[in-house]
Image: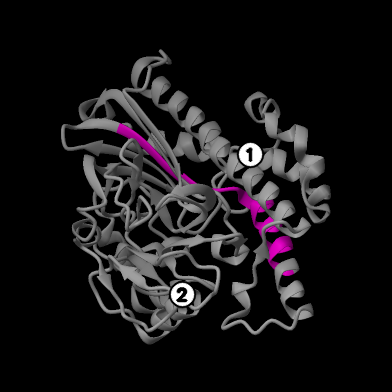
Amino acid sequence: MAYQDLSLSTPTPVLSWAGHDLGPKETQMARNVASLPFMFKHVALMPDVHLGKGALVGSVLATKDAIIPAAVGVDIGCGMAAVKTPYNASQLDGKHKAIRNAIEAAVPVGFEQNKEADKAASNWQGWRSFKDLHKGVQRLEGKALRQLGSLGGGNHFIEVCLDSEDQVWLMLHSGSRNIGNKLAQCHIGTAKALAKLAGQTLPDRDLAHFVKGTPEFAAYWHDLQWSQDYARYNRDVMMARVKRILEQALDGGKPFKPAMQVNCHHNYAEQEVHYGESVYITRKGAVRAREEDYGIIPGSMGAKSFIVKGKGNVQSYCSCSHGAGRTMSRTKAKHQFSLDDLIQQTNGVECRKDAGVLDEIPAAYKPIDQVMAQQRDLVEVVATLKQVICVKG
């Protein structure tokens, strides 16, 4: 048993896999969430837990007949995708820079979008129900169409990795882009306005919630599922482009069939059955890890990443961590480290080494091996990857 009961004297217990004591702000955030009357059984904190908005990043919340939009967050459906290729390390020799350049040319990053939507993006079935989304995003359909197949910024990335047997993998991290962000903001605003109107006393304004059976709950749930589907398909579109680049660079464009592929969310909510009851599960920086689930737990841009298989741990609501988790803010990382530090810590990786990605320096994250050691009862490792090419958002 790797978790500990934090004994916060809250109506709902808090179980933590963190392996370290939470700081005062983190403890208060956990206490706030565990004090809500609609929490079910307990709150589960993953090994990479750290401060978030309303709820801790790296927390799994089970709720009865209610949902907290700020707990899901603004990057709805953010997650990971990975593909195992038939290529080996020797085939990459001398081609790292050219492959990185080709990926950066094919996939828009940061706030950028595709100049024109490609066929795969245009054919997505989700466009049929765009008119049913919140009225606050109706003017954004064109932008959402052009951003389908784009990476975004922050900690989003595309990587070419090698496993312990020198097999080449493709891996990427992205979410629902601007449209998911705007939808989340619309609904978070509605939840806060309703809470104020009802005179609710909340420990944190970002814990404003919707109650099942109300039109607001139904509208948010609809838009949430749409955004999650958009995010998953966004990863599929990008992965298809990167796969074609690798096929062209390593095998004259001959298509390959992936030996393994995984696509998983880590910022999302679903209705699931736990302890024999139907509940709403919000994974805010956590991956579903049922016995049949495969997931991806990335390290920083200079560290190992892991393909994992779930163990179906009941106490964690069948969940595991979504990465290493930050140990310091982006601002602090920029002040504490230099470009020389970044160059040293990303040695051997073909990637940007400039001030624009200094906040993503590996030392700003928890050691991934430590995080993995804390969740041996949640997942088993299927493959260990190390990046050789990294494209940052």
User: Which amino acid type is marked by label 2?
Assistant: Ala
Residue 387 on image: x %, y %: 29, 44
Residue 357 belongs to the span the image colors magenta:
no
Mark 2, residue position = 34
Mark 1, residue position = 148
Q: Residue at x 71, y 38 (%)?
A: 145
From where the camera sits, is residue 212 visible?
yes
Q: Is residue 111 above or below residue 264?
A: below
Helix, strand or loop for disc 2: helix
Q: Residues within 10 Å of mark 1 (few under 14, many from 20)?
A: many
Q: Residue at x 28, y 68 (%)?
A: 18
Relative side of 229 to 393, left or right: right
Helix, strand or loop for disc 1: loop
Q: Residues within 10 Å of mark 2 (few under 14, many from 20)?
A: many
Residue 149 on image: x %, y %: 59, 37
User: Which amino acid type is marked by label 1?
Assistant: Leu
Q: Residue at x 62, y 40 (%)?
A: 230
Relative side of 354 to 191, left or right: left
From where the camera sits, is residue 94 visible?
no
How much space separates mark 2 and mark 1, taking CA atoms?
36 Å
Q: Is residue 149 above or below residue 333?
A: above
> Magenta region: which residues?
169-189
Q: Residue at x 47, y 64 (%)?
A: 40
Q: How is the image coloured?
A: one colour
Residue 222 on image: x %, y %: 69, 47
Residue 138 on image: x %, y %: 82, 48
Q: Main secondary structure of the magenta part?
A: helix
Relative side of 43 to 342, left or right: right
Image-quadrant location for residue 389: top left
If you read the primary sequence from the N terminus, does the residue marked by circle 2 or circle 1 appear first? 2
Looking at the image, how many numbered discs can be counted on the residues?
2
